[in-house]
Amino acid sequence: MKTREEVEALKKIWQNDPIWDIEHTEGFEEYAPELLAFSNDMHSKWRKESARRLAKSFNGQVGKIKKELFQLDNEVGYAHSELELASLEIARLNVRALLLVAEQLADIQDAIEDHTAYIKCLGGE
């Protein structure tokens, strides 16, 4: 019969390298129910810890994605502002171009009036 110390030592060894079914360890048959319960408890604990780490990692990834989305939103907002400024600048340039065309039309009108007056002076209509 194995001692309590030997059972606890077996549990520690198995915890560090749980590649076999501890409850089937040769020489520990009389402790099989205890070892099976221990194995089930440890596997449950490890699954919970793994799920916790996965959730933490997932939450970290979600946090990074949210941060990147906020950053992208700011960049889009800035680009939108830039587009608005660009649109306003284009509108200003169009107005200036139309003012230049209007000035040229006024110059043409003045030239026509001057030419008409000149022709009248020469006696023609």
Image (tube, rainbow, N blue to C red):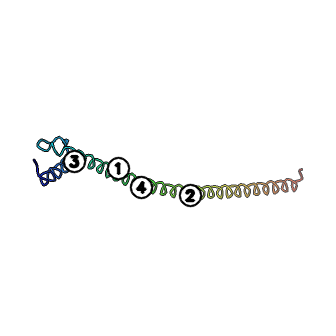
Distance between the Cα atoms at labels 2 and 3? 71 Å
Where residue 83 sits: x, y (%)? 58, 55
Which residue is under mark 2? 82
Q: Earlier in the sequence, mark 3 or mark 4?
A: 3
Where residue 108 sits: x, y (%)? 76, 54
- Residue drawn 73% across the image and 58% down it: 103
Distance between the Cα atoms at labels 1 and 3? 26 Å
The amino acid at mark 2 is: Glu
Distance between the Cα atoms at labels 3 and 4? 45 Å
Left or right for 51, reference 67: left
Where residue 73 sits: x, y (%)? 52, 55
The amino acid at mark 1 is: Ala
SS of the residue under disc 3: helix
Which residue is under mark 4? 64
Mark in the foreground, 2 or 3 = 3
SS of the residue under disc 1: helix
Mark in the foreground, 1 or 3 = 3
* Residue closer to the observer: 77 or 90: 77
Mark in the foreground, 4 or 2 = 4
- Residue drawn 64% across the image and 57% down it: 93
Where residue 107 sits: x, y (%)? 75, 57
Q: Earlier in the sequence, mark 1 or mark 3?
A: 3
The amino acid at mark 3 is: Glu
Q: Are marks 3 and 4 in contact (CB under 8 Å)?
A: no
- Residue drawn 63% across the image and 58% down it: 88
Which residue is under mark 1? 51
The amino acid at mark 4 is: Lys
| Mark seen at residue 34 | 3
SS of the residue under disc 4: helix
Mark in the foreground, 1 or 4 = 1
